[in-house]
Amino acid sequence: MKEGMDRRELLKFSAAAGAFILAGELMKGGLLAQEKTGVTEVDKVTIWVLTDNYYDALRPDSKITKRYRSVPGKSIHAEHGLAYFVETVVDGKASTCMFDFASDAAGVMNNINLLGIDIGKTNAFGLSHGHWDHYLTATSILKQNQSRIVAGTPFYVGEDAFNRRYSVRPNSPEPADLGQLMKEEIESCGLKVVEVKQPTQIIPGAYFTGDIDRITAYEKVPPTLLIKRGEKPEPDDFRGEQALVFNVKEKGLVVISGCAHAGIVNTVRQAQKVAGIDKVHAIMGGFHLLNAKPEKIQSTVADIRAMKPDYIVPAHCTGFETVVSFSKEMPNEFVMNTAGTRYTFGA
């Protein structure tokens, strides 16, 4: 009798084990499928350009843009700097992050208030790289809003974000000191600094690209940009520079760069690799082609055009000549960026 019961129990155990293994395989398959698609799909992503190098109160709206219209006493601030505020909607739930901070705290806060953005409800903060025109307002803005920002809110950075940087200027005997963001200052605002090297989701549907692979032969960092890692400055390779990528439902990828020192083509290809998706819906941000040689500009425009994005939105440090080239070579896709513009991609 005992033996019979043992045999029956064994059969029950075997059946349960088989079901467990099958469930495990199905779960594994689901995880593999998730890894293959790479990133969570968003229903919609909205991007406010909090500030940029250029503002135009009379530029018309388009299918994807809503421009801020200045009135007496309420004008958008523009500067040599870049800052974004981003909202994703996934399964009906909205999440927000601030990506880069520009350099004039009073100007950026002016724009934040005019655009009706509540920094206190931000779910995460992120920095593309450690140059002053992207980080300088961070501590001031965080302190001004600290009482309303949840303690422990993550502040995402890549490698070298807190290193001191320099720039070699023409006819200058010594490199110009570009300053340094201090990790302790960010932590003193109640935020948790999170350094990433791999692709990382910072809010639902918004991903840091992780360290960007260098693929193209022509996207080289100028030797005039330096970083201090040891006792003295050395050429900066921007190994930790980050961009943001989103997979918009039925549209494709939206890629946002800060300066794209790693190259905007390399940046987009990294985004495609992270997402496991080739279709590019929009590329926007600084492309760091200011004062670039014509052949580098031409190669960049040709490679971006070959990606067939629906929209191309150069900003900040892209450079006048490059902006003109994109407008001529990709007139149907080109969007002129202005500070204070809200972009909406998706439903």
Image: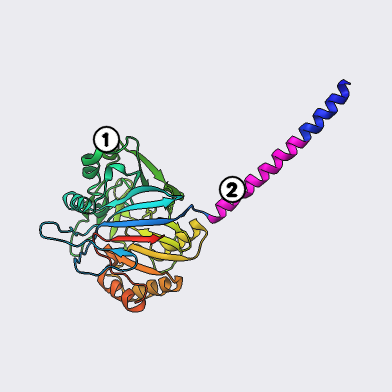
> In this orientation, does residue 249 appear?
yes
Q: Residue furthest left?
A: 72
Assign the C terminus to one quadrant of the image.
Answer: bottom left
> Which residue is labeled 2 in the image?
31
Figure coloring = rainbow
- Residue at 29 percent of width and 38 percent of height: 149
Secondary structure of the residue carrying tag 2 is helix
- Residue at 34 percent of width and 65 percent of height: 64
Task: Mark 1 or mark 2: name the one nearer the start of the chain.
Answer: 2
Residue 108 spot, x, y in % from top left: 21, 52
- Residue at 23 percent of width and 44 percent of height: 141
Q: CA distance from mark 1 to mark 2?
A: 38 Å
Would residue 165 be counted in the magenta stretch? no
Residue 27 spot, x, y in % from top left: 63, 45
Residue 178 spot, x, y in % from top left: 23, 52
* Amino acid type, mark 1: Ser
Secondary structure of the residue carrying tag 1 is helix
Foreground of the two, 4 or 225: 4
* Amino acid type, mark 2: Leu
On the rendered structure, is 119 left or right of 252?
left
Q: Which residues are magenta?
A: 15-37
- CB atoms of marks 1 and 2 within 8 Å: no
Above or below residue 188? Residue 111 is below
The rendered magenta stretch, by its main secondary structure, is classed as helix
> In this orientation, does residue 288 appear?
no
> Which residue is labeled 1 in the image?
188
